[in-house]
Image: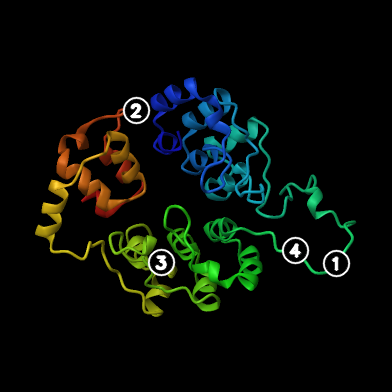
Amino acid sequence: LKDAGVINDVKTMKLILKRNPQLARMQDEDNWQGPLLEVALVGHLEAAQLLVEFGNADVNARAGEHDEGGSVYWHTLQIYGSDHPIVQYLQAQGARSIEPSQGIEVNGEGKDSSQDSSNTGSDESVFEYELTDLIDASLVNDIETMKDILKEKPEWASHENANGWNALHEAAFNGHLEATQLLVEQAGVDVNTWTNNSDETGSILFLINEHLPSGHPVIEYLISKGAKSMPPTSGQDPETTEMTNDNSDFDYTEVDLSFAAVNNDFRTVETILRKKPDWARIRDQNGWEVLHIIVRFGHLESTK
């Protein structure tokens, strides 16, 4: 359901929700309360409407195992601003803007009872963060939260989420210079880190060179720290790699191709198209081919 939502495959979402509407409200492996958060982050209004109106998804869902992350409205507001249709829709549905880890609404209407100043006991603060909080904070350049977490758990800076990305990937990919500097200089994250510790995805500088404009401060900073732009490679001779892929089991669908395109998973796109080149010209229910999706997200390598 989440994969279909990320690429706005409303037809597949309807089929899934018709049989299992509760999936719109179930926590996933990244501790996100249902797929609404991820669908909203990529700005798909129709998919979001389906989750809310057909699947009864919670418009005030928050990231984190204990709901300590920011609300879906807060995250989308940081990315798109108040004029985007997805932000306006969530607001019309009663969504609130709640910051990560604090339980405080941005409009100042109230705060989480867990932050009640009347709480008594030890003066020592309780560390209640999860790894996902650091990665989420890096995504939105929340420096104060990052500092709080890194003070207690500096090793988390190099830990990866379910998609194989660490905090530096998120900070750099989204162009946050201050967060990037904090992770490199305070936490000591390797500037030549690879996604999921694999040379099949490219170095972090390679990834952001494909995403950020030339001369961006984050790119210049990483280069000054010794970062190298290393493209995806399996470490094998190309002819050997091609033979291996030709003889391997093929277990992909058209949806896998679209999802790989959204995430700039160049290796999967290449693997699928080697076997099914005609899939590059299949149109989805919105009339889009996979190239439309790749260009929409600005992925140069997959476009080539």
Q: Quadrant of residue 235?
A: bottom left
Q: Residues within 10 Å of mark 2 (few under 14, many from 20)?
A: few
Q: Residue at x 65, y 38 (%)?
A: 60
Identify the residue under disc 4. 126
Q: Element under label 1?
A: loop
Quick one: quadrant of the N terminus?
Answer: top left
* Disc with the residue nearer the chain's start (4 vs 2): 4
Whole-number angstrom distance, CA of label 1 to CA of label 2: 57 Å
Residue type at the position of mark 4: Val
**Which residue of the protein is positioned furthest toward the top in this rendering?**
18
**Left-right relation of 64 to 3:** right
Query: Residue shown at 25%/39% (left/top)?
Result: 251
Question: Mark 3 or mark 2, which is nearer to you?
Answer: 2
Q: Earlier in the sequence, mark 1 or mark 2?
A: 1
Which residue: 33% across, 66% down? 203
Q: Which mark is residue 251?
A: none
**x and y percent of residue 296 in the render?**
34, 43
Q: Give the residue type that dot 2 points to.
A: Asn
283 vs 202, nearest the viewer:
202
Q: Could you tell me which secondary element the residue under label 4 belongs to?
A: loop
Above or below, 255 relative to 62:
above
Q: Secondary structure at mark 3?
A: loop
Q: Which mark is residue 216?
A: 3
Q: Which mark is residue 122?
A: 1
- Pointers 1 and 2 in contact (CB under 8 A)? no
Q: Are dots 3 and 4 in contact, CB under 8 Å? A: no
Q: Could you give the CA–CA distance between mark 3 and mark 4, rounded to whole angstroms?
A: 38 Å
Q: Nearer the viewer, residue 174 or 68?
A: 68
